[in-house]
Image (spheres, helix red, strand yellow):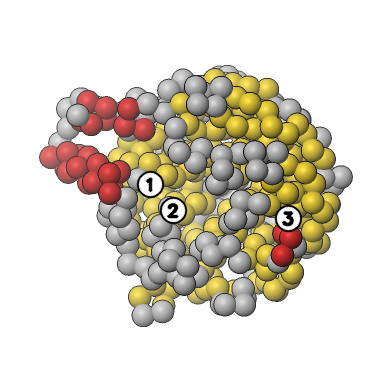
């Protein structure tokens, strides 16, 4: 039945891919070689960033110790090219839920790369398994849920932006989902910044900085995205966002210095939970939610700070600490480790990653960091 959803004539190899994707969709079993952490989550204790270099993109891998300290392991080619400049997005580098795969955008070559995460005998390494067309121009953000993968392409002056879907096979290859390609709110430039699934994978959400709109794509048969419904952002320049385990969608508002929370209703409706709660800092752009779903953190790129918010039971938010931590120059991407113990931030202006232990009440305690990232670096993942 999925052959119809994926397309017309199919080769034996593509049929095998569909069978593999179906197996992954129904069973959702981890397949890459990876160790299990103390909390039962799969994958090694590691942190990853992306060089985004125009002459050859690569993933920078670090091992994470029990104290949160990072040790560089190596750089691994994505097989594609970056842009050499800021993507102005969140989610350019993501991991699957089981921690077995990393997916990266190659904005300079309009591709997506897949790498397996391996931790054999305590030695962390990555292996490139696929490089596929992003089915658009200038990919900047990725979303995963089980074997489903979606990419956000912002487009350029002559090609409109779009989203497109794929299945990730158990051996790390991407199979396009026929009919999943959908437009953004406009054929004109939208400044789209991030794509992500809601917790039940019933819909996808995309933020658009230039239009002050948030797009919601319901998902149909086989994970195929349907045409978008667009809703106005409560504050100016909706940028990065995070989705809490309970389903609240927390969106940063860069130009108004605030954070809003929303929820997608059962019938696809869009509900405002908290409207433009300020953090009294400048340019909050990236957002992450703690592992327990009780706190949200946003980096303030022009204030060199991290702010924290408390998340209520119904998804409402309130400012916890306008300066939960000070950072080095121009903090951007954020990531919380899979065990929920540490938060990491990439300081774009300093070429470093800073680490913080998540304390009681959502507090942040520095655990040091690492330097040496190139100025073109993008993305951050913590396992």
Circles 2 and 1 in contact, beta carbons < 8 Å: yes
Provide residue 181's location: percent of width, then percent of height: 41, 27
Classify 243 as above or below 45.
above
Image disc number at residue 146: 1
**Whether residue 158 is visible:** no
Distance in Å between CA atoms under marks 2 and 1:
7 Å
Neighbours of disc 3 within 10 Å: few (<14), some (14-19), many (20+):
many
Distance in Å between CA atoms under marks 2 and 3:
25 Å
What residue sits 51% from the left and 23% below the top? 268
User: Which quarter of the figure has residue 252?
Assistant: top right
Of the image marks 2 and 1, the number of the one nearer the N terminus: 2
Provide residue 338's location: percent of width, then percent of height: 52, 61
Residue at the left extreme? 12
Classify 165 as above or below 160.
below
Residue at the front extreme? 313
Of the image marks 2 and 3, the number of the one nearer the N terminus: 2
Image disc number at residue 97: 2
Q: Nearer the viewer, mark 1 or mark 3?
A: 1
Q: Which residue is mark 3?
A: 331
Of the image marks 1 and 3, the number of the one nearer the N terminus: 1
Neighbours of disc 1 within 10 Å: few (<14), some (14-19), many (20+):
some
What residue sits 49% from the left and 47% below the top? 105
User: Which quarter of the figure has residue 145?
Assistant: top left
Q: What is the secondary structure assignment of the residue under circle 3?
A: strand
Classify 105 as above or below 383.
above
């Amino acid at each position: 039945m999925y052959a119809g959803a994926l397309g017309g004539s199919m080769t034996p190899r593509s049929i095998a891919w569909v069978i593999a994707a179906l197996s992954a969709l129904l069973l959702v079993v981890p397949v890459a070689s990876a160790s299990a952490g103390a909390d039962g989550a799969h994958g090694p204790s590691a942190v990853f960033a992306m060089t985004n270099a125009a002459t050859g993109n690569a993933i920078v891998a670090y091992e994470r110790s029990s104290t949160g300290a990072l040790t560089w392991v190596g750089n691994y080619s994505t097989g594609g090219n970056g842009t050499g400049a800021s993507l102005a997005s969140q989610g350019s580098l993501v991991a699957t839920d089981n921690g077995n795969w990393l997916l990266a955008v190659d904005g300079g070559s309009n591709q997506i790369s897949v790498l397996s995460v391996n931790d054999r005998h305590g030695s962390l390494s990555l292996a490139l398994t696929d490089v596929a067309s992003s089915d658009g121009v200038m990919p900047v953000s990725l979303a995963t849920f089980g074997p489903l993968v979606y990419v956000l392409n912002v487009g350029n002056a002559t090609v409109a932006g779009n989203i497109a879907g794929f299945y990730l096979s158990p051996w790390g290859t991407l199979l396009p989902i026929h009919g999943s390609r959908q437009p953004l709110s406009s054929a004109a430039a939208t400044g789209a910044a991030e794509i992500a699934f809601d917790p039940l994978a019933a819909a996808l959400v995309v933020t658009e900085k230039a239009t002050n709109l948030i797009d919601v794509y319901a998902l149909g048969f086989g994970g195929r995205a349907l045409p978008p419904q667009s809703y106005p952002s409560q504050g100016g320049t909706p940028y990065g966002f995070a989705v809490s385990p309970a389903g609240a969608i927390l969106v940063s508002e860069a130009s108004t210095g605030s954070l809003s929370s929303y929820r997608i209703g059962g019938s696809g409706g869009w509900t405002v939970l908290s409207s433009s709660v300020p953090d009294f800092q400048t340019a909050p752009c990236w957002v992450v939610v703690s592992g327990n779903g009780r706190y949200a953190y946003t980096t303030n790129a022009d204030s060199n700070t991290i702010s924290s918010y408390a998340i209520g039971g119904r998804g409402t938010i309130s400012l916890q600490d306008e300066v939960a931590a000070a950072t080095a120059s121009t903090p951007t991407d954020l990531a919380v480790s899979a065990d929920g113990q540490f938060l990491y931030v990439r300081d774009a202006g300093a070429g470093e990653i800073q680490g913080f232990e998540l304390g009681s009440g959502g507090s942040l305690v520095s655990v040091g960091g690492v330097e040496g990232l190139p100025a073109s670096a993008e993305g951050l993942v913590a396992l």
